[in-house]
Image: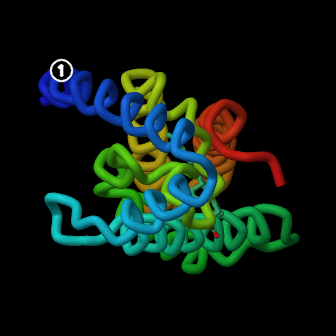
Amino acid sequence: MKTLRVKTAAPAIAAVMILTACGESGGSEAASEASSEAASAQLPNGMTIKEQIEARQGQLEKVGDAFKAISDQLKAGSPDIAVIQEAAAAVPEATQGMADWFPEGSGPESGIDTDALPSIWENMPDFQEKVGNMQEAAAALNTAAQGGDIAAIGEAFKTTGGTCKACHDDYRLDD
Ligand code: HEC
């Protein structure tokens, strides 16, 4: 499945590189016209690029909120395990389809406000590996949370946080 995606991505990458080159040689007006066209272009999943970017940002915001909820509880004197359990369950759910959230053309070249760096599309296999690492860690965090052992939850939370950071360091624009 993964191999297939990587293989089929190669011609698309080449096509985008050609498009980018054309946009640049056509001057900035042509380039921005090309971006707004790109933003409203329909993806195979039926979403426009703009909708795809906004959808992934919405999902990641949920993940960020869930992470903060867990962190707040772990710092509290007596953590509310029910809050942790609900938040930990939300992370795998919110990130389920993440491998498909970054189609070709949904980077900054779309003209849509995004913190996704172009390096994602230059290193897609590595990016996808980082998606997988996070999903694996988040599933283990959820299992630990449902088990209720605070020490185990703390460890799994740290591990998962490391997988978020590993991707953000390389592929997300710094705030
Ligand atoms: C494989 C890479 C990757 C992983 C893993 C990852 N992120 Fe991100 N994250 C991104 C990228 C890229 C963006 C920028 C998306 C955009 O703006 O289009 C982002 C954006 C965000 C945002 C901002 C959303 C918004 O626009 O409001 C939050 C919050 C966030 N991530 C939290 C997390 C947390 C918490 C984890 C770990 C559980 C995580 N991310 C794991 C790549 C990743």
**What residue type is disc 1 on?**
Lys
Quarter that holds the C terminus = bottom right
Q: Nearer the viewer, residue 13 or 141?
A: 13
Q: Is residue 108 above or below residue 87?
A: above
Q: What residue sits right under mark 1 in the picture?
A: 7
* Residue at image point 68% right, 73% down: 69
Q: Quadrant of residue 104?
A: top left
Q: Is residue 148 above or below residue 58?
A: above
* Residue at image point 41% right, 29% down: 17
Q: Quadrant of residue 7?
A: top left
Q: Position of residue 88 (x, y in %)?
A: 50, 64
* Residue at image point 38% right, 38% down: 19
Answer whether residue 144 is visible to the viewer in this image.
no
- The picture quadrant for ligand 1 comes to bottom right
Dot 1: within a 10 Å radius of its alpha carbon, few (fewer than 14), some, or many (20 or more) residues?
A: few
Q: Position of residue 60 (x, y in %)?
A: 54, 64
* Residue at image point 55% right, 66% down: 112
Q: Position of residue 45 (x, y in %)?
A: 16, 63
Left-right relation of 59 to 40: right
